[in-house]
Image (cartoon, coloured by chain):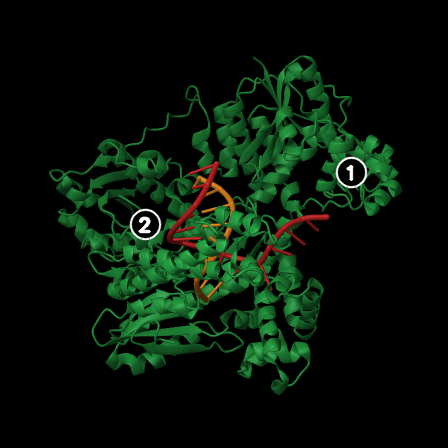
Chain colours: A green, B orange, C red
Amino acid sequence: MSHFVLIDGNSIANRAFYALPLLSTSAGLHTNAVLGFTTMLLKVLEEMEPTHIMVAFDAGKVVFRHTEYAEYKGGRAKTPPELSEQFPLIRELLDAFSIKRFELEGYEADDIIGTLTKRADEQNWKTTVITGDKDMLQLVSDHVSVALTRKGVSEIELYTPQEIQEKYGLAPLQIIDLKGLMGDSSDNIPGVPGVGEKTALKLLHEYGSVEAVLENVDRVSGKKLQENLRENVDKAKMSKELATILREAPVELDVEATGYSGYDGAVLAEFFKKMEFKSLLPKIKVDAPAKGEEKAAPFQFEVVTAETADRFADKLTSPMAIYVEMDGDNYHHAPILGFGLSADDTVLYVPWDVAKDWQAFCKWLADDTQKKWTFDGKRDTVGLAWHGLEILGIDFDVYLASYLLNATESNPTLDSIASQYAKVRVLADEEVYGKGAKRMLPESDVLSEHVAHKAAAIWQSVPVLREQLAENQMNELLDDLEAPLSMVLAQMEKQGVKVNRDRLAQMGVELDAKLEELTGQIYELAGRTFNINSPKQLGEILFDVLDLPVLKKTKTGPSTSADVLEKLAPYHPIIDAILTFRQLGKLRSTYIEGLTKEIHSQSSKVHTLYNQATTATGRLSSTDPNLQNIPIRMEEGRKIREAFIPSEEGWYMLAADYSQIELRILAHISGDENLIDAFRRGMDIHTRTAMDVFGVGEGEVTSLMRRQAKAVNFGIVYGISDYGLSQNLGITRKEAGDFIERYFSVFSGVKHWMEEIVKQAKQDGYVTTLLNRRRYLPDIRSSNFNLRSFAERTAMNTPIQGTAADVIKLAMIRMQESLREKGLKSRMLLQVHDELVFEVPQDELEAMQQLVPEVMESALELNVPLKVDVNYGQSWYDAK
DNA sequence: ATGGTCACG
DNA sequence: ACGTACGTGACCATA
């Protein structure tokens, strides 16, 4: 059966360009749109198996619509040169694929596709249109489906008439009426003012078309809406015309001429090489090896056994890629299965039982001069340490490198790294081991090949990663910050923190009693029993049985979150009981029961896992258990910290935290003179902000004024919006807006910086921290208001939060060095974003109280001082 | 698996 | 007209 695929070339190229980071070849040629286009094509060819395929492009400056409406597409931003220069490459790409492309002077790709689908439809061909443009949904019919790209170009969503009906309640042709009413800002189709998607859909469900709406305008509910419709009759009609895709363009291309019989693998490979798409090369389907090209050698590796080990001793070289395979994600517990090793043409697999008794290997492993390339060296270091082995000489970590190159793709996996930077394919662990309850070890030959692939992938990726890091000037960030930090974190994780199990149990007993009492009270107040932990059941009790007002909704029903409940508290005594129940329940399940489960059987301590490649901003995160969210704000919860104690008799817990680090960093990078002055004078920053914003003297700042100023300062760091501030302070949006305006008039340097950073983000597509950490913001130029606004706030927040992360990471490295140099026994145990926690012998207390702030405050020189507060006590609770 | 809620900076 | 404060992870209920 025939299957005709039509691709909207401009739409896909645009999507791909904005979805992918701005990649370039070593020669400086930008290729991200080409790459996205290519992945899409490979996917379409494989999954849709078209018998006919073509790509349509817009052509020429004069599109016939212009003559009808001068401003058509006027609102659209100019195509950036980085994208325009890729169009010729995309044409080359299509030629390499032997796919027909077509353009027609004065017409858009839409119209070409509209015309061809009509012809195909008449012949009853199965037809699929691929585009990112929702307008095209109007082409859908029984034979024609439209595939919309989502998440850039990596995923597609197929629309048939049924799906359009389900999603919009409209027939395909009514999509035109929808656009006619709501308009489309990206195409500068005006629509009717005041009518968005919701209103437009409501009108169409009732009347069916733009014309019918206009005829029945008297019956439309809403005075303002009626007025808008009456005053914009012409605009509505014209918008509908603009949104209508032409189905009778003078396209001379015969549908039959788009017949497709596959591509020449060798030609395509040549093009991929030119584009430096190394990872795509293996995806080219070749029926027979192309003439003149040697068949790729099958993957070869050797398994080392106890008997043959001696023969392999001289294969252990420097540098060499090593992958330590473990059974499970938590390397504090996981058994080690074996090692993959690779360098040049050597690829080895060494089972654990062989490796642990192979002396030459263990010696090589612990030899600092033998350089190792790894995937997650911290995992290797800690995992091996639990089994009594030492690994030294880690010289490159592809996990950290890949994270730095793209922090938005959190937790890079080796299979994805391999597909981006290496030739060899690596299966996802899930494919080898299964997931969840179905997880199990595969046959030993499957396992050894999988691990061997991993080592080979690391070996091949390193040079590519090095080069890309160099292009972004990020080698220093890796070599001097993240890599040394990973070894500091390894020590902290392995060291662990002592937790007093009995203390927790005792608190648990007290909580149980209180919770039981509360449960009884709640049931009585509700008049029946129910599951208080179920938002659904709780909602029924509150809003149906007790008939309390619904203040906020979630996707699934009325919200019962704490901020809503607090507002409902005056209505009914059950609310306070529920709030307390929630609070205590959280303490019991997460912090008593959860934490107790994490106490390690071997060490009686908790050993967290710091994730160094998860956050988009450069912060760490902590799991199993998460030690970065131990309660502190409420006294009942804060008591949990009494269970965190030193691991040795007579030692102390010492905590040091940066004071206002984010605002100090804002002062530095914005250069705002007022903010800098405040910090140089050592003032309380919230009081100072209140003085400036309210125009009062220091003695006249009330606690309310200080509280409001504090909220404004938080808002500034988060990328302020009047709505967010109004929510936080419980004031109107207008009042919040006034605060912000006054803040910006006093701290004009901050305002200027915020405008500039957003502008820069729009230009570059990313923002950076002081140490050149980078975060891409693909939505910064989105036409979707929400996505764009979010990206803009992120552009303001990330340099601040990310630089703070840089600073404390630097301090941790210096701190560890300092402890070693001075021969101190004190140990760094925890990092909580702006705080470091140590355990300290009594005779080092004095020295540490001096040293820790000194090292932290001098980690990075800014144009304002950094300030650190230190406290110590018998437990983490007492270090306050 | 997903969403709601809540703990932290 | 839109619908939000920035960054995380754990637990519970429910599909």
User: Which residue has dot 2 on it?
Assistant: A373
Q: Earlier in the sequence, mark 1 or mark 2?
A: 1
Q: Are marks 1 and 2 on the same chain?
A: yes
**Category of crowding for the residue at label 1, using alpha-carbon neighbours closer than 10 angstroms: few (below 14), some (14–19), many (at least 20):** many
The picture places residue A83, in percent across and down from the top left corner, at 64, 42
Query: In the depicted view, which residue is nearer to us: A228 or A455?
Result: A228
Q: In terms of secondary structure, where does tag 2 sit?
A: strand
Query: In the depicted view, which residue is nearer to us: A720 or A76?
Result: A720
Q: Is residue A300 left or right of residue A536?
A: left
Q: Is residue A485 left or right of residue A4?
A: left
Q: Quadrant of residue A734?
A: bottom right
Q: Dots 1 and 2: beta carbons under 8 Å?
A: no
Kindly identify which chain the residue marked by label 2 belongs to: A
Q: Is residue A468 visible?
A: yes
Q: Quadrant of residue A158?
A: top right
Q: In terms of secondary structure, where does tag 1 sit?
A: helix
The kind of residue on which mark 2 rests is: Trp
Vertical side of A12 occupied by A494: above or below: below
The picture places residue A521, in percent across and down from the top left corner, at 43, 58
* CA separation in Å, label 1 and label 2: 59 Å
Q: Is residue C14 left or right of residue A688?
A: left
Tell me the number on the disc at residue A181: 1
Query: In the depicted view, which residue is nearer to us: A174 or A538?
Result: A538
Residue at image x 13%, y 49%?
A359
The kind of residue on which mark 1 rests is: Leu
Kindly identify which chain the residue marked by label 1 belongs to: A
